[in-house]
C-alpha cells in the first residue's frame, strides 16, 4: 500500500512538471488561431511552424554558437576547478583551510555585484562585444565546482598517491595520471552542470553580444520574442516552435550523459 502511495505521488509530480513541456510542444504544432486553446493535442496539426521559424531567423548559427561556447565554458571550468580542487585536497600548506574558506565565501556574492567591474575589464581588453567573455571567465574556476571536486579527491585512497610519490611521481603526474581518471564521474557532473548553465544563460549574452550572427540560443530566443511575441508581429506559434527547438539539445545531452550524471551525483552524496 505504501508503495502504491509513493508511485501515485511520483506520478502526480511527474505530470505537474511534464505538463508545461507538453503544452509547449503541443502549442508549437498548432495554427495561429488555436495556440492558446489549451487543447492537449494540436488540432489542426501545423508542423510548418518549425519550417517558418527556421527560415525566418538563423537558428542554425545560434545553435552552433551555443554549442561552441558551451563546450569551451564547460571544458575550461572543469579543468581549472579540478586543478584547484586537487591542490586543496592533496597538499598541506600554511593557510590552506583559510584560503579554501575564502574561495567558498565567493559563492555568497551575488552575480550582479561583479557584473559592471567584469564588463569594464573586458572592455579595457577590447573583447566586450565578442563571445570570449561568455566562456573565458571559467578559466579561473568556480567555487562550487572546486568544492564539489575537492570532495571527490578527498574520497580517493591517499595510500595510492603516497606509493606513487615513493616511486618518483611528481604532482602533475599524480593529477593527470591518477586523480583525474579516478574522479571521472565528478568531472562529468561538473562538465554537464556548466554546459547546461552556459546553454541557458541569457544575462551574459544580453550584456556582451551585439551582432545577430554572434547570438547564442537564449539571446536569439529573446530576439524571436521581440519580433514575433508581444509588441511584435504576434506570431506566437513561431516563438513556441523556436523555444521547443532550443530544448532539444539539452534533452539529448541528458539522455547521453544521464548514466554518468546519476552515478557522479550519487557518489558525491555518499561521500558527503
Image (tube, rainbow, N blue to C red):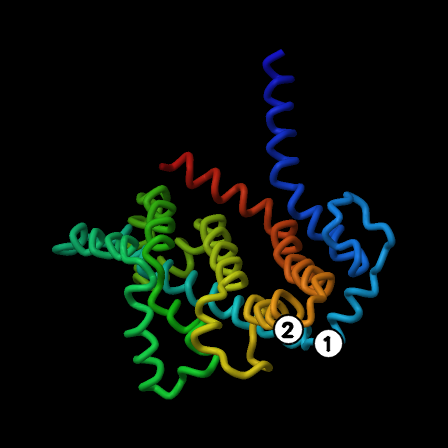
Residue 53, position as x, y percentages in the image: 74, 70
Q: Which residue lies furthest to the bottom in this view?
A: 126
Query: Is 189 located above or below residue 219 in the figure?
Result: above
For mark 1, does the 10 Å Cα neighbourhood hold few (<14), some (14 to 19), or many (20 or more) residues?
Answer: few
Query: Residue at position x 49%, y 48% from top?
Result: 185
Q: Which of 173 and 110 is in front in this view?
A: 110
Q: Mark 1 = which residue?
A: 56
Pointer 2 with pointer 1, Cβ within 8 A = yes
Q: Is residue 105 left or right of residue 269?
A: left
Query: Residue at position x 75%, y 55% from top?
Result: 35
Q: Distance of mark 2 from mark 1, alpha carbons?
A: 10 Å
Residue 41, position as x, y percentages in the image: 81, 45
From the viewer's perspective, is the residue at label 2 or at label 1 nearer?
A: 2
Q: Quadrant of the C terminus?
A: top left
- Mark 2 vs 1, N-terminal side: 1
Q: Which mark is residue 227?
A: 2
Q: Which residue lies furthest to the top in this view?
A: 1
Q: In this view, does 207 lie to the left or right of 226?
A: left
Amino acid at each position: 500500500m505504501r508503495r502504491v502511495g509513493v508511485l501515485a505521488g511520483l506520478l502526480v509530480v511527474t505530470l505537474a512538471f511534464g505538463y508545461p513541456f507538453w503544452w509547449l510542444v503541443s502549442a508549437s504544432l498548432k495554427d495561429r488561431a488555436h495556440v492558446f486553446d489549451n487543447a492537449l493535442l494540436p488540432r489542426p496539426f501545423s508542423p510548418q511552424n518549425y519550417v517558418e521559424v527556421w527560415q525566418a531567423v538563423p537558428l542554425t548559427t545560434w545553435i552552433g554558437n551555443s554549442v561552441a561556447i558551451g563546450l569551451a565554458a564547460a571544458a575550461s571550468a572543469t579543468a581549472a576547478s579540478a586543478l584547484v580542487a586537487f591542490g586543496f585536497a592533496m597538499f598541506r600548506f600554511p593557510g590552506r583551510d583559510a584560503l579554501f574558506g575564502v574561495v567558498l565565501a565567493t559563492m555568497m556574492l551575488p552575480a550582479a555585484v561583479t557584473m559592471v567591474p567584469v564588463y569594464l575589464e573586458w572592455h579595457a581588453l577590447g573583447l566586450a562585444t565578442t563571445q570570449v567573455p561568455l566562456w573565458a571567465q571559467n578559466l579561473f574556476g568556480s567555487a562550487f565546482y572546486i568544492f564539489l571536486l575537492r570532495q571527490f579527491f578527498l574520497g580517493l585512497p591517499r595510500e595510492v598517491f603516497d606509493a606513487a610519490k615513493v616511486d618518483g611521481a611528481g604532482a602533475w603526474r599524480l593529477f593527470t595520471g591518477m586523480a583525474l581518471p579516478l574522479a571521472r564521474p565528478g568531472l562529468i557532473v561538473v562538465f554537464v552542470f556548466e554546459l547546461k548553465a552556459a546553454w541557458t544563460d541569457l544575462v551574459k549574452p544580453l550584456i556582451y553580444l551585439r551582432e545577430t550572427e554572434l547570438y547564442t540560443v537564449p539571446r536569439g530566443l529573446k530576439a524571436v520574442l521581440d519580433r514575433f511575441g508581444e509588441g511584435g508581429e504576434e506570431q506566437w506559434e513561431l516563438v513556441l516552435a523556436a523555444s521547443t527547438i532550443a530544448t532539444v539539445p539539452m534533452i539529448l545531452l541528458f539522455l547521453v550523459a544521464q548514466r554518468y550524471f546519476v552515478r557522479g551525483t550519487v557518489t558525491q552524496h555518499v561521500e558527503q
